[in-house]
Image: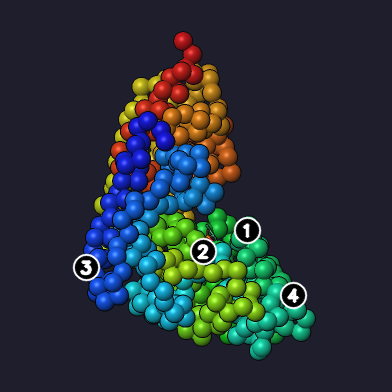
Amino acid sequence: MPRFLSRRKFFGKSGQALMATGAALSGGAFAEAHGKSAPSAKGVDYYRKLGVTPFINAAGTYTILSASTMPEEVQAAIAEASKYPVQIEELHVAAGEYLARRLRCEAALVTAGAASALTLGTAACITVGNDPAIISIPTDMSGLKNEVIVQKAHRYDYDHALRNCGIRFVEVETLADYEAAFNDRTVMAHFFNAAEHGAISREDWVRVAHQHGVPCFNDAAADVPPIANLWNYTQMGFDLVTFSGGKGIRGPQCTGLLLGRKDLIAAAVKNNSPYSNTVGRGMKVAKEEIIGLVAAVDWLLAQDEQAMQAEFQRRAERIAQHLKRLPSVETKIFVPPVANQVPHLLITYDPQHIEITGREVMVKLRQGEPRIELNPATGGGSASAGLQSGEHTIVVGVWMMEPGEDLIVARRLREVLREATRA
Ligand SMILES: *Cc1c(COP(=O)(O)O)cnc(C)c1O
């Protein structure tokens, strides 16, 4: 564990939350009735035991970097839920009804991530469009309707989650193409909410699909905040919408939300674990994760969005302030338009003055103490969400930092850039 981060400091809040839960539970109704005692053990620091060093997250909600951490309330709800067995079908139904009420849609399902929601939502559309289909998906699709219409510019790496259902994509570019693409094999129209290109608007996408009686799905996995997006797209008419549970919502990393039409969610449920002969059987969410996502949605809906955004802005400004006296350094705060819609700090400099590439800065921060992970767009790395980058650009994501970590990142960046400054 890095020096500055004692175990207590890094995990202190969660540790306290766990202990508080334990104390509360020993007086809890179930525990009293059943004579269960609260666990007294403090969690072992398995990261340390395994030699895996945590880092300061100056990147954002990237799955490869474990994305987000869960607020204390969420961790405590999970710890509580983990103690008691429940009926999984009953829990799924109750959680779905609760989430649908809170998120202003007809129905909801907790899935094993947005990618799983893409698979289950697609399976649901196939199931509704063909009967019976569930046990055939994805390997025995002959004779089944399986076409999914998508804009060419909305093809992406998450396509695989749809292709897992044995679908065939039909690509369109113009509105006229789209209108002509529907036929009796069409089961779904798919939209990628944060796509940077594509000529057909969300409204047209929904309208034309509905003219043909075909359900449309919007993948908005990384598009919270704004919090209101959690109902904006279902209310716009999309029949299915997914969000990652472990990105801006800050629930368990392995969860997602599938929101939408009652009959489609019911069909998604039938294609999912705990049922064995289904495409979704490997996409199990445990009771802890279901409860964790419900608690995270409650947590998020209780936040003051403006105050959160203002805090992110202050962090970015504080880091910029620390770097402003370095030669040629310029900073800009950028809020991506759809996905990851929070302030990011973009730092550029002239390599004539500061002789280091963004990639080299990234490696130095990763190897330093404490470890720091910069946004992957740094140094011209594959940028997402409209983040502009280049060989001599450093991108700092501030929204997944713990309070105070912005200063540590600022000092370390100044140190590395100063060392590379020409005398
Ligand atoms: C992150 C992401 C996903 C996958 O989400 P998981 O919750 O990690 O499964 C799907 N689609 C888009 C656009 C994403 O950004």
- Within 10 Å of the Cα at label 2, are there few (<14), some (14-19), or many (20+) other Cα atoms? many
The reply to whether the C-beta atoms of the residues labelled 1 and 3 are less than 8 Å apart is: no
Which quadrant: the N terminus?
A: top left
The reply to whether the C-beta atoms of the residues labelled 4 and 1 are less than 8 Å apart is: no
Q: Give SS at disc 1.
A: loop
The reply to whether the C-beta atoms of the residues labelled 1 and 2 are less than 8 Å apart is: no
- The mark that comes first in sequence, 1 or 2, is 2
The label shown at residue 156 is 1
- The mark that comes first in sequence, 3 or 4, is 3
Q: Give SS at disc 4.
A: loop
Q: Is residue 318 left or right of residue 341?
A: left
The reply to whether the C-beta atoms of the residues labelled 2 and 3 are less than 8 Å apart is: no
Distance in Å between CA atoms under marks 4 and 1: 22 Å
Q: Nearer the viewer, mark 4 or mark 1?
A: 4
Residue topped by disc 2: 113
Q: Is residue 292 left or right of residue 116?
A: left
Q: Give SS at disc 2.
A: loop
Q: Is mark 1 within 8 Å of ligand 1?
A: yes
The reply to whether the C-beta atoms of the residues labelled 2 and 4 are less than 8 Å apart is: no
Residue topped by disc 3: 27
Measuring 36% from the left and 77% from the top, which residue is drawn there?
A: 98
Q: Is mark 2 within 8 Å of ligand 1?
A: yes
Image x and y of residue 378, in percent: 52, 37
Residue topped by disc 4: 139
Measuring 39% from the left and 66% from the top, which residue is drawn there?
A: 82
Distance in Å between CA atoms under marks 2 and 3: 34 Å
Q: Note whether 3 is above or below 222 in the view shown.
A: above
- The mark that comes first in sequence, 2 or 3, is 3
The amino acid at mark 2 is: Gly
Q: Give SS at disc 3.
A: loop
